[in-house]
Amino acid sequence: MKILTGYILKEFVKIFMLTLSAFVSLYLIIDVFEHLDTMIEHNVRFADSLRFFLYKAPFIFYQVSPVAVLMATLLSLGIFAKYNEIVAALSGGISLLRLCIPFFACALVISGLNFVLNESIIPLANKKVMAIMQTMEGKDTRATFAQNSIWFRDNAGIYSIDYIEPQNGIMHGLTIYKMSDDFNIVKRVDVREAKWIDGKWLATGVRSLNFHGNKLLGTSTAETDIIPIAEKPEDISDAGRLAEEMNFMELTDYIDKLEKGGYAAARYVVDLHSKISFPLVSVIMVMMGIPFALRNRRRGGMAFGAGMSIIIGFSYWVVSAINISLGYNGIIPPFLAAWLTNLVFAAFGALMLTYVRQ
């Protein structure tokens, strides 16, 4: 039995590595052509370009490994079926469950690896990717925001910031909107730059506009002024963070901070659950792949394995994207948004395994 298990593991790992390499290479090639014009336009150095794609590699592995697991399961079982090795094993008294254990063991190892990557390497690598992207787009690489601007609010108003340098305590392109009780703008303050000095924000290049309804009442300017924002530079920079740039505990703390501040955090709660649910997709892909391969032994082969991998993988992606979108918009609970696709596909795979004929 040890010989058979070793043989299955060897074939599975070999096909998984080949398939994974192909998927990662294809992903990177597409990504290169997608960013090539921007790199040329902004004269991005070759070393920076290389680092950009190297930093993306862990996240690409995380994304494509479940499909590689599925294809490895289908192709390796297809090879075994082609040479009647499955029939021989079953005829020799080896149960179907025992035959499938090596596949599930590999999937669990890959799921564990994905969880570790997503907790340690991927958040740091994604931050590096964003910094290089800002360079390619001609933005200041010292900024730590994830989008083109940061938005946040407090009791005094709503704030928009082009970008912030938290390590230097400087905000660039700050706009403050003060609202009336019926949510009309009563005052707008434009600030060229604000610097955190002695626990206060000292603004330079200040212009204030006062409104009544839709009518502009007057404007005023000042070279310097104190902006009454209580948040520290690091607190403001956190407002622009992406879930992909945080590990599980960091995202948990961030959600807690948003909820205490009265912000909607549904999107981040969905992403929090996804940090656990997505790594387990590799196990579910094995549950889906084994019955398909065993029920179609005569058609087992490269074309069948690749075709079924594309169909199952695409189906999972579509259903998952719909559920995630529903969760982001608060239509279904975040837990359900992150886990429903896994539950549906796992149930379907388990049902198919039950009805597989020896």
Image (tube, rainbow, N blue to C red):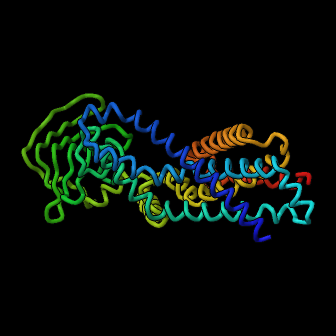
The residue at the far top in this view is: 215
Q: Name the residue: 66% across, 39% down.
A: 310
On screen, 42 above or below 108? Answer: above
Residue 333 is at least partly visible in this image = no
User: Left or right: where does residue 132 sit relative to residue 27?
Assistant: left
User: Left or right: where does residue 255 sit relative to residue 82?
Assistant: left
- Residue 89: quadrant of the picture: bottom right
Give coordinates of residue 188: x percent, y percent. Answer: 23, 39
Front in this rendered view, residue 200 or 95: 95
Quarter the C terminus occupies: bottom right
Front in this rendered view, residue 357 or 94: 94
On screen, 93 above or below 222? Answer: below
- Residue 321: quadrant of the picture: top right
User: Left or right: where does residue 179 sit relative to residue 328?
Assistant: left
Give coordinates of residue 320: x percent, y percent. Answer: 63, 45
Q: Name the residue: 73% across, 48% down.
A: 74
Quarter the N terminus occupies: bottom right
The residue at the far bottom in this view is: 2
Give the number of marks.
Answer: 0
On screen, 122 above or below 27? Answer: below
Front in this rendered view, residue 32 or 335: 32
Give coordinates of residue 110: x percent, y percent. Answer: 60, 61
Q: Name the residue: 68% across, 56% down.
A: 12
Residue 50 is at least partly visible in this image = yes
Front in this rendered view, residue 333 or 146: 146
Q: Name the residue: 42% across, 58% down.
A: 123
Give coordinates of residue 151: x percent, y percent. Answer: 34, 46
User: Left or right: where does residue 215 sit relative to residue 244?
Assistant: left
